[in-house]
Image (tube, rainbow, N blue to C red):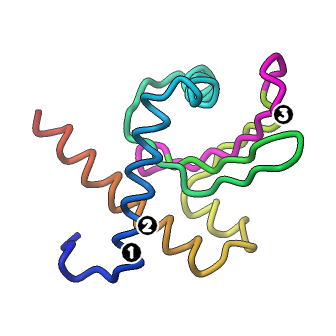
Amino acid sequence: MIVARLSLSDKLTIAELETGREHLLLEPASQRLLMSLRRRLQSITQNIYIVRHISEQAEDLFDVLVDGKLVVHIELPRDARSEEVVFKIFGVDEYLNTRTHLTKIGRRRLKLALELAEQHARRTDKT
């Protein structure tokens, strides 16, 4: 991805994706989501991006890109004592085909997250 050729909107989206990733990995407030992902996927990957988040009255809904290969839809109740309500795993193509409600912006956000995940994987492979 050549950053100089990106639109301002894409640059802002990339910054949001990177900030969300850092928040998910480092902030105590995100540990419940991170632990649910790791427990259910049996993975400790750091190559994860929140591509969609909706706050509802009783729960938070997340779609998280994992390793650039899977999208996990998870619904976490606001009550921390409760387990996740929904945990669905999709391949990227399956996610795009079943999530017909995704807006053009949502699809662009996923595309940028896929590019970031690919870059992250390349950097990790070199070390």
Considering the image in quadrants, where does the C terminus appear?
top left
Compared to residue 55, the image places residue 36 above or below, namely: above
- Spot occupied by residue 82 in the image (x, y as percentages of width and height): 84, 21
The numbered disc on residue 86 is none
> Callout 3: helix, strand or loop?
loop
- Spot occupied by residue 21 in the image (x, y as percentages of width and height): 43, 43
Which residues, given as a range, are shown in magenta? 66-83
Tell me if 49 is positioned left or right of 14 in this view.
Answer: right
Going by the numbered disc 3, the residue's amino acid type is Val
Compared to residue 56, the image places residue 86 above or below, namely: above
Q: Which residue is mark 1?
A: 10
Considering the image in quadrants, where does the N terminus appear?
bottom left
Q: Which residue is mark 2?
A: 13
Q: Which residue is mark 3?
A: 85
Q: 80 or 86: which is nearer to us?
A: 80
Whole-angstrom CA distance, mark 3 to mark 2, is 28 Å
> Callout 2: helix, strand or loop?
helix
Tell me if 15 is positioned left or right of 77 in this view.
Answer: left
Q: Earlier in the sequence, mark 1 or mark 3?
A: 1
Whole-angstrom CA distance, mark 1 to mark 3, is 32 Å
Residue at 60% across, 20% down: 39
Mark 1, residues whose alpha carbon is within 10 Å: few (<14), some, or many (≥20)?
some
Tell me if 60 is positioned left or right of 89 in this view.
Answer: right
Tell me whether the residue at label 1 lies in contact with that at label 2, contact meaning CB atoms closer than 8 angstroms: yes
Going by the numbered disc 1, the residue's amino acid type is Asp
